[in-house]
Amino acid sequence: MGEWVRLCGREELPSESEAKEFCVRGHTLCVATLNGKPLALDNVCPHRGGPLAEGAIEHGKIVCPWHQWEFDLATGQAKQAATVKAMTYPLRQQDDDVLVEI
């Protein structure tokens, strides 16, 4: 079990179907809002190291801007390879804060 730490305030979350980069405790995360729910995964693309938060969101997936690999926002699973997955991080909202488990 990890530790729950403050990621940001609710007002700092990205708009629906957008992604934003956040740094917390030495981790750089890609946070996106999909269907009203914030989701977080590692910002470094496991394929070639691209910045996932700079990618577009299409059909519930974040598309890496470097090589267009797609990762499911909820599971981190890559569309292109069953053995490749981006690490996901649980989020929860507490009052006006968004917490992440690191």
Image (tube, rainbow, N blue to C red):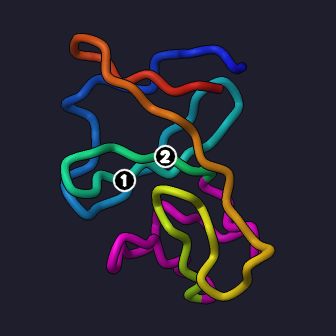
Q: What residue type is labelled 1?
A: Ala
Quick check: is 5 in the magenta stretch? no
Which label belongs to residue 40? Answer: 2
Measure the C-alpha gap from mark 1 to mark 2: 7 Å
Dot 1, crowdedness within 10 Å: few (<14), some or many (≥20)?
many
Compared to residue 70, the image places residue 53 above or below, namely above
Q: Which residue is drawn at 62% across and 43% down?
A: 28
Q: How many marks?
A: 2
Q: Quadrant of the C terminus?
A: top right
Magenta segment, prevailing SS (helix, strand or loop) = loop
Q: Which mark is residue 81?
A: none
Q: Which amino acid does label 2 sit on?
A: Ala
Query: Residue 24 appears in which quarter of the rendering?
Result: top right
What is the x, y in percent for residue 21?
A: 47, 48
Residue 31 percent across, percent down from the top left: 43, 48
Image quadrant where residue 35 sits: bottom left
| Quadrant of the drawing holding the N terminus | top right
**Do residues under tags 1 and 2 come within 8 Å of each other at their CB atoms?**
yes
Question: Which quadrant would residue 59 be assigned to in this image?
Answer: bottom left
Chain part drawn in magenta? 43-67
Q: Mark 1 points at which residue?
A: 32
- The image shows residue 79 at horizontal and vertical percentages of 59, 83
Q: Residue at x 55, y 58 (%)?
A: 75
User: In the picture provided, is 34 more to the left or to the right than 51?
Assistant: left
Q: In this view, does 62 lie to the left or right of 17?
A: right
Membership of 49 in magenta stretch: yes
